[in-house]
Image: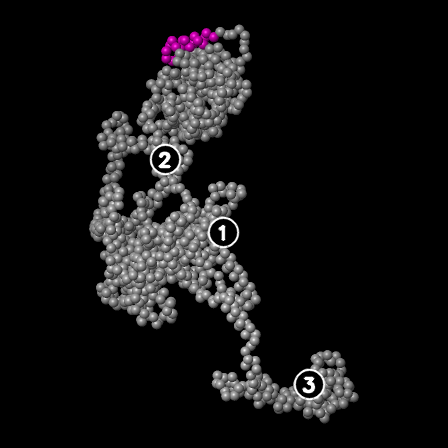
């Protein structure tokens, strides 16, 4: 490396000092080759020099013409290549001495640099348990340690004073375990607080049944379906709180996983559940059933089917019976009116009419033999010519004795005389209405009759006088759709049932006397007791409202009802006849369920009728029969 | 909340919920204003406040890491007592006994908790102590009446001073602590219950002239001490354990007089007939007999048997009991003792049997106690399929389903011995069945034929009657039945009509009651049908196995 330095002009190299420099390179006093100090040498990378010597001259870098080939050649030729390092500060190459090599090797092995240093010297236990004769430190004790402290004395005297004055008390011994004594030694039952009288003690937990046993009888174990159902139920809904399980021996029984839960729930119940005394209804269900008079005591009433009147054509819509009770008229859907003899069930007469027979009414006056039939827009007055010939003749005479009044009066309907053909059949008068008629009813005396039209208008209800062939409309304006109309049996009253209520009009004074609220949705029909005090209203929502006219306008009793006596077309159950005892407390007693009709076209019983003199009931049904129950 | 729990204040259901809740129907709990005012007058409220202040101070000291202050505060930790609340809530002792069920169950549960976490160690120890004390009282007074092994735990019922006290203990397994349980609520309850139970125990011990806190009887103590005292570290702990071993009798304040069972003076109460007196006397006798059920018997518990409940039950009925010395302290005699009469074991097989004692499964003890008599041991040998364990708490009313085992038991209690008869019958039946089996098939064919014939005849008759005139004379007997049936029909119809006439509310009630009744009947029928099916299945299996054996 020397020739490189020689070729550098102006540089004075202190070769003399080299040996000492190489041995102690870090000491600045002996060899200060470069005065830049301990700086990163990269700063001089781009300069030709690498620092300054003591005299302030530049130290130039060696001319680096050593390429890879030179390096290789040197490596091959120089036997000391492995111990040659480059000095970063001067750029000179140094050969490490033997000592330096050894130091490097020691450091590499992780040993101390100093050869003579022994890290494992035996430890001398200086502060040991053994008391030495000489003190460790030779310092004499301070004077403070011989005289009592004044500040301490002050504190102690304060405490002493406090104790003397009783300000500080000795600490109480702690009691860990609570002491128990006879708490109820002096029980005084009178001293019970009022609160405790009101107190509702918590109900005890339900005791377990057989199903909770660890080895229950086999019938208490759930089958697979039941178990599935149990698991799908909400925990509150389950009838069994736990799934019954069976174990062969006590050893096999596991811990119950919800034990703590259950205790916790009990705790919650105890302090969060409202408590209330609930009166348990402890009644015998038999006692709830009202005591009704025995049906046997209320006899006679119809109890069995006696006769069947077969109508071959179609369903029998309406029934009527003559006041003597000998003849029965029935109107059917195919436009015929049949007259039956009650006792023999024979059809005496068949009267074809123009359309469906909506309603039939036999004149209640026993001296007049007349039937009012409503067919479409007409009301026919028919003399059936049955029974006493004299009676029939008298009726005819009565009708014929009409003398037309002098002055023609304006009438809401037309009174027509029948054609001879019709006369032969028995028709005596035709009352032609403007609209369809759905119901007709007679007054008790047999002279007046009322008819109800189908559509709502002021002329829906008309009253006709058959002997004078004169009609009038009693109402100036309509008050709802009229369902049916009845004459009061004894007083000059007209009862009009609309959808929701029943109105009673006094015909003489021409005023409204009463309005009965039926409390049901749609009144279908109405019946009045022969005494005139009690009214029964049937409705389409299968209710019966029973009014007592003397008491109030509200129903005296509302009965949820099977197919009502006055409600046609409900079921194949014929209704129980309604028996009214006019004693102190009138009672409605269902007496008997009469069965017989079969359902056709979803319709069962269409009309029900009592016999005027006998305890018999007629019922007409959709199956084309009329049945007599006796 | 804590106050409500301690004072036993519970919410009330207002009469008009909407009105009280200002129109909203949201679920809320309502307390009576009176109750809340009552709570405010409670002196313990001040103690609670003090405690709150203490906690605050302590936290502050911790925050400032003033350890001396912390120590001082801890030393002066405010405490409170619940004595007056117990007295106030239960003005008489009987009231307290009535409410003891929950207290006992809770104490027994807490005493099984591990000593770490969840609640204070002192509470657990106290619970354990009180529970053991109570058990010892029950043993001393012999007041246990019923026990029941349910899947939840073991139910016990004791009659303490005429009051039935029922409690449940869990099976001895470590608890899987649920996370959705508020242990603070439970701890508050337990706090109150321990106070209550302590006082009740004191009073009960006093009533029996026993020393409270309980001490083991002197002689037994002397015997026990030298042997086992050294093996246990702490004296106090070992003492409690010895107590809980339940093997020794307790010391009495007054030396036990042997005239304990003084004949009860008979005070003829007016208005009570002789029959009632007799019945009472009889009841008394049976009770005495029940109390001495295991008297003179010596039991040995094998190590797999739950020791504590069994030892408790056996000692309650006067038996002597021991167990393996390594299992627990307090064993009085060894397994090889000749005088042992019953060896309770819960293994499928016994390796070495000692002659002169019964090896039984633990269910025998429970069933015998419930049956009030020592049951025949044959059903309870190790490895045998046990008879079902029935609940003693069920009292069947009329119309309820009664399992056949219960019927058998009742019959046995009445003194009959239907067991043998029925077994014999069964055997006979089986024999018959086997003999008849082959015949049966033929018979079945025959019977089928017969039935067909009958049916044909009936049909013929019917057709004949249809063809013939309607006025046909029917036999008298049939007529009679008809009449009865008619009457019945009429009655039912009358009833139906009457039901129609009922008021709406009454009808609703009536329907509800009838529904409940019908459901009961349905359930009973279902159970019976299930049992029948099960029995028949069992029988068939038996038959098959027998056949297989023969083959």
Residue annotated with mark 2: A288
Mark 2 or mark 3, which has the lower sequence index?
A: 3
Q: Is label 1 on the same chain as label 2?
A: no
Considering only vertical position in the picture, is B406 above or below A86? above
- Callout 2: residue from which chain? A
- Chain letter for mark 3: A
Q: Which residues are magenta?
A: A385-402
Numbered mark located on residue A252 in the image: none
Q: Nearer the viewer, residue B470 or A229?
A: A229
Q: Secondary structure at mark 1?
A: helix
Q: Which residue is mark 3?
A: A87
Q: CA distance from mark 3 to mark 1?
A: 93 Å
| Residue A205 appears in the figure | no
Quadrant assignment for the C terminus of chain B: bottom left
Residue A585 part of the magenta-drawn span:
no
From this view, report whether residue A417 is shown above or below residue B342: above
Question: Residue shown at 37%/59% (left/top)?
Answer: B131
Residue under circle 1? B40
Asked if one can make out residue B222 in the rendered structure from this viewpoint, the answer is yes
Figure quadrant of residue B210: bottom left
Rendered location of residue B545, percent (x, y): 26, 55
Q: Residue furthest bottom?
A: A16
- The reply to the same-chain question for discs 2 and 3 is yes
A608 vs B346: above or below: above
Q: Quadrant of residue B511?
A: top left
């Amino acid at each position: 490396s020397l020739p490189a330095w020689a070729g550098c002009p102006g540089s004075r190299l202190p070769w003399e000092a080299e040996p000492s420099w190489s041995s102690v390179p870090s000491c600045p006093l002996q060899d200060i080759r470069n005065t830049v100090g301990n700086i990163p040498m990269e700063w001089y990378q781009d300069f030709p020099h690498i620092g300054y010597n003591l005299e302030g001259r530049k130290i130039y870098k060696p001319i680096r013409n050593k390429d890879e080939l030179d390096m290789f050649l040197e490596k091959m030729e120089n036997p000391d290549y492995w111990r040659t390092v480059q000095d970063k500060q001067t750029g000179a190459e140094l050969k490490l001495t033997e000592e330096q090599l050894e130091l490097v090797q020691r450091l590499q092995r992780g040993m101390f640099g100093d050869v003579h240093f022994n890290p494992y010297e035996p430890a001398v236990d200086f502060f040991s348990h053994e008391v030495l004769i000489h003190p460790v430190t030779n310092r004499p004790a301070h004077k403070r340690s011989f005289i009592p402290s004044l500040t301490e004395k002050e504190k102690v005297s304060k405490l002493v004073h406090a104790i003397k004055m009783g300000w500080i008390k000795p600490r109480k011994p702690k009691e860990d375990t609570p002491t128990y004594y006879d708490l109820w030694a002096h029980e005084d039952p009178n001293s019970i607080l009022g609160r405790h009288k009101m107190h509702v003690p918590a109900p005890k937990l339900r005791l377990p049944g057989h199903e909770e046993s660890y080895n229950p009888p086999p019938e208490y174990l759930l089958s697979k379906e039941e178990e599935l159902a149990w698991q799908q139920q909400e925990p509150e809904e389950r009838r069994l709180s736990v799934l019954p399980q069976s174990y062969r021996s006590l050893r096999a029984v596991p811990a119950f996983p919800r034990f703590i839960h259950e205790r916790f729930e009990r705790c919650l119940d105890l302090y969060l559940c409202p408590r209330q005394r609930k009166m348990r209804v402890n009644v015998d269900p038999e006692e709830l059933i009202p005591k009704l008079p025995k049906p046997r005591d209320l006899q006679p009433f119809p109890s069995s089917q006696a006769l069947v009147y077969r109508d071959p054509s179609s369903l029998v819509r309406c029934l009527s019976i003559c006041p003597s009770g000998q003849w029965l008229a029935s109107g059917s859907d195919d436009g015929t009116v049949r007259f039956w003899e009650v006792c023999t069930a024979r059809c005496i007469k068949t009267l074809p009419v123009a359309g469906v027979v909506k309603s039939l009414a036999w004149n209640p006056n026993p001296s007049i033999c007349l039937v009012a039939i409503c067919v479409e827009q007409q009301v026919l007055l028919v003399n059936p010519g049955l029974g006493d010939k004299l009676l029939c003749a008298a009726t005819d005479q009565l009708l014929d004795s009409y003398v037309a009044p002098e002055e023609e009066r304006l009438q809401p309907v037309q009174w027509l005389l029948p054609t001879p053909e019709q006369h032969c059949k028995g028709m005596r008068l035709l009352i032609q209405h403007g609209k369809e008629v759905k119901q007709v009813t007679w007054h008790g005396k047999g002279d007046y009759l009322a008819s109800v039209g189908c559509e709502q208008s002021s002329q829906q209800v008309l009253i006709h006088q058959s002997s004078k062939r004169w009609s009038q409309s009693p109402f100036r304006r309509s008050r709802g759709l009229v369902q049916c109309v009845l004459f009061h049996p004894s007083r000059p009253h007209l009862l009009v049932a609309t959808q929701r209520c029943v109105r009673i009009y006094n015909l003489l004074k021409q005023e409204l006397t009463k309005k009965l609220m039926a409390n049901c949705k749609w009144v279908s029909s109405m019946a009045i007791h022969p005494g005139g005090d009690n009214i029964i209203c049937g409705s389409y929502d299968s209710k019966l409202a029973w009014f007592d006219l003397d008491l109030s306008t509200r129903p005296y009793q509302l009965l949820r009802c099977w197919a009502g006596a006055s409600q046609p077309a409900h079921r194949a159950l014929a209704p129980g006849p309604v028996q009214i005892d006019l004693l102190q407390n009138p009672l409605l007693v269902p007496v008997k369920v009469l069965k017989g009709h079969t359902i056709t076209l979803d319709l069962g019983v269409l009309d029900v009728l009592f016999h005027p003199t006998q305890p018999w009931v007629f019922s007409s049904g959709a199956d084309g029969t009329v049945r007599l129950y006796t | 909340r804590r106050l409500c729990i301690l004072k036993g204040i519970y919410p009330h259901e207002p009469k008009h919920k909407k009105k009280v809740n200002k129109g909203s129907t949201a679920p809320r709990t309502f307390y009576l204003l009176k109750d809340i005012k009552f709570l405010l007058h409670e002196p313990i409220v001040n103690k609670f406040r003090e405690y709150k202040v203490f906690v605050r101070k302590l936290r502050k000291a911790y925050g400032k890491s003033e350890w001396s202050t912390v120590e001082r505060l801890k030393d002066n930790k405010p405490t409170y007592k619940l004595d007056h609340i117990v007295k106030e809530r239960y003005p008489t002792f009987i009231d307290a006994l009535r409410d003891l069920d929950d207290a006992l169950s809770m104490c027994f549960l807490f005493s099984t908790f591990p000593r770490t976490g969840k609640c204070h160690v002192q509470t657990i120890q106290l619970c354990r102590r009180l529970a053991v004390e109570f058990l010892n009282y029950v043993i001393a007074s012999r007041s246990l009446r019923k026990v029941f092994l349910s899947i939840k735990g073991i139910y016990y019922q004791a009659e303490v001073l005429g009051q039935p006290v029922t409690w449940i203990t869990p099976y001895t397994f470590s608890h899987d602590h649920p996370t959705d349980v508020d242990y603070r609520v439970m701890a508050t309850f337990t706090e109150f219950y321990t106070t209550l139970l302590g006082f009740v125990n004191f009073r009960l011990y006093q009533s029996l002239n026993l020393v409270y806190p309980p001490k083991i009887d002197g002689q037994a103590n002397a015997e026990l001490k030298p042997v086992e005292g050294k093996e246990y570290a702490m004296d106090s702990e070992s003492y409690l354990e010895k107590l809980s071993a339940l093997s020794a009798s307790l010391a009495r304040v007054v030396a036990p007089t042997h005239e304990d069972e003084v004949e009860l003076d008979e005070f003829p109460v007016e208005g009570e007939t002789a029959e009632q007196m007799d019945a009472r006397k009889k009841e008394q006798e049976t009770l005495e007999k029940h109390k001495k059920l295991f008297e003179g018997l010596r039991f040995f518990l094998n190590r797999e048997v739950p020791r504590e409940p069994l030892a408790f039950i056996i000692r309650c009925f006067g038996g002597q009991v021991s167990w393996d010395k390594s299992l627990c302290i307090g064993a009085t005699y060894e397994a090889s003792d000749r005088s042992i009469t019953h060896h309770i074991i819960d293994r499928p097989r016994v390796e070495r049997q000692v002659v002169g004692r019964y090896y039984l499964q633990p269910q025998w003890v429970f069933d015998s106690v419930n049956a009030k008599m020592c049951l025949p041991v044959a059903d309870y040998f190790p490895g045998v399929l046990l008879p079902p364990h029935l609940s003693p708490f069920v009292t069947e009313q009329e119309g309820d389903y009664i399992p056949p085992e219960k019927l058998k038991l009742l019959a046995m209690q009445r003194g009959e011995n239907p067991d043998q008869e029925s077994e014999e019958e069964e055997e006979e039946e089986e024999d018959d069945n086997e003999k008849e089996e082959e015949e049966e098939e033929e018979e079945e064919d025959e019977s089928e034929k017969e039935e067909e014939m009958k049916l044909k005849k009936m049909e013929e008759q019917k057709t004949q009657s249809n063809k013939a005139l309607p006025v046909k004379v029917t036999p008298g007997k049939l007529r009679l039945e008809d009449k009865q049936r008619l009457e019945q029909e009429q009655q039912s119809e009358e009833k139906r009509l009457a039901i129609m006439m009922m008021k709406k509310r009454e009808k609703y009630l009536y329907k509800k009651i009838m529904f409940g009744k019908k459901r009961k009947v349905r359930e009973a029928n279902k159970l019976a049908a299930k049992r029948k099916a099960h029995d028949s299945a069992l029988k068939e299996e038996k038959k098959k196995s027998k056949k297989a054996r023969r083959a």
